[in-house]
Image: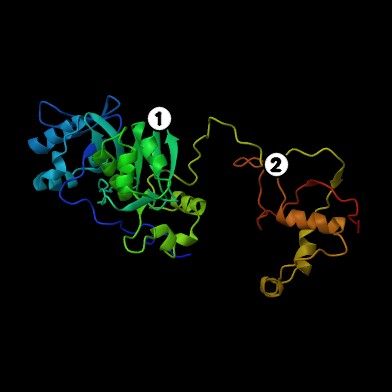
Amino acid sequence: MGPLADRTQSEPAAPVRGRAPSLGLRPGVAFAVAGDGRLTVSVHGTPVARVSGLSSALSQALADLESGATSILDEESLAGEFARLPQTVRGCVLTAVRLENRTLALAEPLRAGEPPSAPVALEPGDLVRSSRFAYSHRQNDELLVESPVAGARIIVLDDSLGLLLAATAQASRVETLERRLASVLPAHTVREILELMLGVRVLEVAERESGEFPSDSDPVLRQWDFHDLLFHSRSRFGRTAEPFGGIFPHRGRIEPRSAVRECHAGQLVELPAPSFDDVLERDPSLLMAMETRHSCRTFGEQPLTLDELGEFLFRSARVSAGPALPGFSPPLPHRRRCLRTRAVSHRASCRRS
């Protein structure tokens, strides 16, 4: 498979021309202009930042976003000033689809510092369908629609989007979707939502000449499976703003499960531990072991002796107790102390040497 970066996050088609995208505030965020002219940023009623030095026009435009005003990016001077704002402020402003006084959907960048997502223009005859990499899930009290090939995701804020998302499971013309959802959403709103979905790449549009979708024709995307790509997008640095790695979110709240499984019922067999000096004397060198090793795909006729089984498990899978990870002790070279190891014997034919 080709490189994950670049190829799976290539630029979509041209953004919507002739108008700036609608903007909205992240749920729970509010802007207010104080008496001294500073802009106060609040999250769920708690002030988290105050910004000074803004023009009165930009401060007011940001404060008006709660009511759906979109003049920030319409005017070139305000757009330039907005781009220079701290990330704590810009990250609260998202691309939005609004219907009258309702915000239906927001597009949230997945990486810090990303500008608001730009919708991508669609024509009535364009053939669209949801990406096979797109998925939805709940986070806190929000329904999110995202894709591991995208740098942004959709925050669903209105029930009517559920019908539209379901309708895009099959390839359909834009004009067909507008007619099917006419009883729920106006045609221009359906178009705006589809254009925003295409901008964040949870929707794909077929080539107008060949009728092929990118996920069917791109040689890199065709080789990726949804779960494989999702794993990479959540475990590689730079592809998401979400925390990942050894963050231990439940430390101190949920006791870890024991690394050692409870003993099975049945007879226990004491396994002899090998002598380190004996092993050192007869073991081949690292070079010889690497050059002569090979994988056996068939079972031998003679089972392991008890001594051989004990040495094999001691050198590859022994366990002990430690303060950091209870019950786990990898067989590192510096752990030369012989440990008492128990294993359950499931085979009576294990020969004793």
Report the residue at 16% width, 38% height from top. 70
Colouring rule applied to residues = rainbow
On the image, which quarter does residue 3 sit in? bottom left
For mark 1, what is the residue?
141
Secondary structure state at the residue bearing disc 1? loop
On the image, which quarter does residue 32 sit in? top left
Percent position of residue 121, x then y? 25, 51
- The disc, 1 or 2, on the residue closer to the chain's N-terminal end is 1
Report the amino acid beneath label 1: Asp
For mark 2, what is the residue?
260
Disc 2 crowd, CA 10 A, few/some/many (<14, 14-19, 20+): few
Whether 264 is drawn above or below 151: the answer is above
Q: CA distance from mark 1 to mark 2?
A: 37 Å
Q: Is residue 274 left or right of residue 40?
A: right
On the image, which quarter does residue 97 sit in? top left
Disc 1 crowd, CA 10 A, few/some/many (<14, 14-19, 20+): few
Report the amino acid beneath label 2: Val
Report the residue at 52% width, 34% height from top. 250
Residue 93 visible from this viewpoint: no
Percent position of residue 302, x then y? 88, 63
Q: Is residue 124 left or right of residue 272?
A: left
Secondary structure state at the residue bearing disc 2? loop
Number of labelled discs?
2
Q: Is residue 7 left or right of residue 272?
A: left
Whether 252 is drawn above or below 346: the answer is above
Residue 16 visible from this viewpoint: yes
Disc nearest the viewer among 1 and 2: 1
Q: Is residue 272 left or right of residue 113?
A: right
Percent position of residue 325, x then y? 61, 42
Q: Residues at badges 1 and 2 in contact (C-beta under 8 Å)?
A: no
